[in-house]
Image: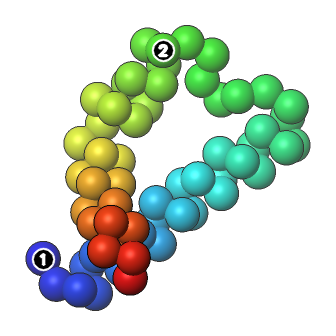
Amino acid sequence: MTFNDAINYYLKMISDFNDEMLDFIRTNKYRNTSFEEVNQAMYNNPDVMVSHMYASFLKIKNI
C-alpha cells in the first residue's frame, strides 16, 4: 500500500462518515436501526472495513 492509497482510504472513510451524518440530519433517523443492519453494512463488509482499517493508520500516526 502506498501513501496515496492510505490518503484515498482516509478520504473515503471521511466521506462515508459525512454521508451518514447528512442522512441523519435530513431524516432525523439512523440508516441502520439494529446491530444486525450495522454489522452487515459495515463490520461484515470487507470493502468498508479494509478502507477504514487503512485510513485508521493515518490517524494513529497523526498524519
* Label 1 sits on residue: 1
Q: Which mark is residue 37?
A: none
Q: Amino acid at mark 2?
A: Phe
CB atoms of marks 1 and 2 within 8 Å: no
Residue farthest along the left direction in this orientation: 1
Decide if residue 54 is on the left or right side of residue 33: left
Measured along the vertical axis of the image, is residue 10 above or below residue 33?
below
Question: Relative to residue 18, is residue 10 depicted above or below?
Answer: below
Q: Residue 50 location, x and y as percent?
A: 24, 52
Mark 2, residue position: 35
Please identify the quarter of the rendering in which residue 45 is found: top left
**How would you rate the neighbour count of disc 2 (Cα within 10 Å): few for under 14, some for 14-19, many for 20 or more?**
few
| Residue 61 placement, left or right of 32 | left
Pointer 1 local density, CA inside 10 Å: few below 14, some 14–19, many at least 20: few
Point 56% across, 63% down: residue:
15
* Secondary element at tag 2: helix
Is residue 24 something that shows in the picture?
yes
Mark-to-mark CA distance, 1 and 2: 31 Å
Residue 32: x %, y % from top left: 60, 23
Q: Point out the tag, 1 or 2, that comes first from the N-terminus.
A: 1
- In the image, residue 35 lies at what x, y percent? 48, 15
Is residue 47 at least partly visible in the picture?
no
Looking at numbered disc 1 in the image, what kind of residue is underneath it? Met
Judging from the image, what secondary structure is the residue with disc 1 in? loop
Question: Which quadrant, please, contains the C terminus?
Answer: bottom left
Q: Quadrant of the N terminus?
A: bottom left
The residue that appears at 40% across and 35% down in the rendered structure is: 42
| Among the 4 quarters of the image, the one containing residue 9 | bottom left
Q: Residue at x 30, y 46 (%)?
A: 49
